[in-house]
Image (cartoon, rainbow, N blue to C red):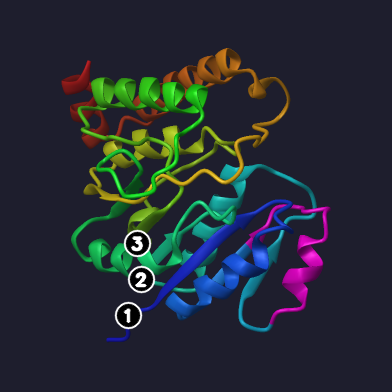
Amino acid sequence: MNYRWLTALPVYNEVRYVDDVLDEVCEYSPEVLVVDDGSTDGTGELLAARNDIQVVRHARNRGYGAGLKTAFQFAVREGYDCLVTIDCDGQHEPQRIPQFVAACAHADLVSGSRYLRQFDGDSEPPADRQRINRRITDELNRRLGLHLTDAFCGFKAYRVRALQRLHLTETGYAMPIELWVQAVAAGLKLIELPVPLVYLDESRSFGGELDNAATRLQHYYDVLERSLRAVRARGEPVAAEALAAAS
């Protein structure tokens, strides 16, 4: 049986990085999908000039989570076995893609972790991002009975058939929180894989008021509570057991 896998990159206004990142990704992935989330900086023109990738374009910017959801839907619709997601801002090392694919043979979701172990040359993360990541990671572990070290790393691999068990609705940067809740509710097998800690752009905007660290942290807590309520409302048996044990 032919095992088909795909690497997908959600992209929004990454004209500085997109060609260099894609050149490298294409060395390590047999098929590459870019979800252009309504870029307006010339990224779309660069993507259109390439013949070694597939592109799905959102007519307007819908958010990081929406870009990932489009990649999930594409992988399910086209019958892939494994989907790798990687960011396009140069923070992830494409040469690690095959490691994620291999690890996905033993798990439904393989999530990169920048804090599982140290690598030579690791960056110093922005203080507010590290603090928020730690707070949310600790809360997910407490509420869901997990042992995560990094709740927000975008470098992941998924068994595509497992994606069909998720009902994701979050469209922004909080989508990984909803993902973890639903993954536990669905009884998916989850593992982390260490990746280097690389920050090339510390000025990323999370969108309007979410650029304020305190507001962003509260938003993440709100999404967590909303995601837990949604799972409980669906009455999924695995979710009920997992959430009761984690309460």
Quarter location, residue 95:
bottom left
Span of residues in magenta: 35-50
User: Closer to the N terminus: mark 2 or mark 1?
Assistant: 1
Image location of residue 168, percent across then percent down? 49, 41
| Mark sitting on residue 3 | 1
Residue that label 2 marks: 81
In this rendering, which labeled residue sits more in front, label 3 or label 2?
Answer: 2
Q: Secondary structure at mark 3?
A: helix
Foreground of the two, 81 or 91: 91
**Callout 2, which amino acid?**
Asp
User: Closer to the N terminus: mark 3 or mark 2?
Assistant: 2
Q: Is residue 227 left or right of residue 242?
A: right
Is the C-beta separation of discs 2 and 1 under 8 Å?
A: yes
| Mark sitting on residue 161 | 3
Is the C-beta separation of discs 3 and 2 under 8 Å?
A: yes
Q: Is residue 176 above or below residue 140?
A: below
**Callout 3, which amino acid?**
Arg
Q: Secondary structure at mark 2?
A: loop
User: Closer to the N terminus: mark 3 or mark 1?
Assistant: 1
How many numbered circles does the render carry? 3
In the orientation shown, which residue stands out farthest toward the front? 121
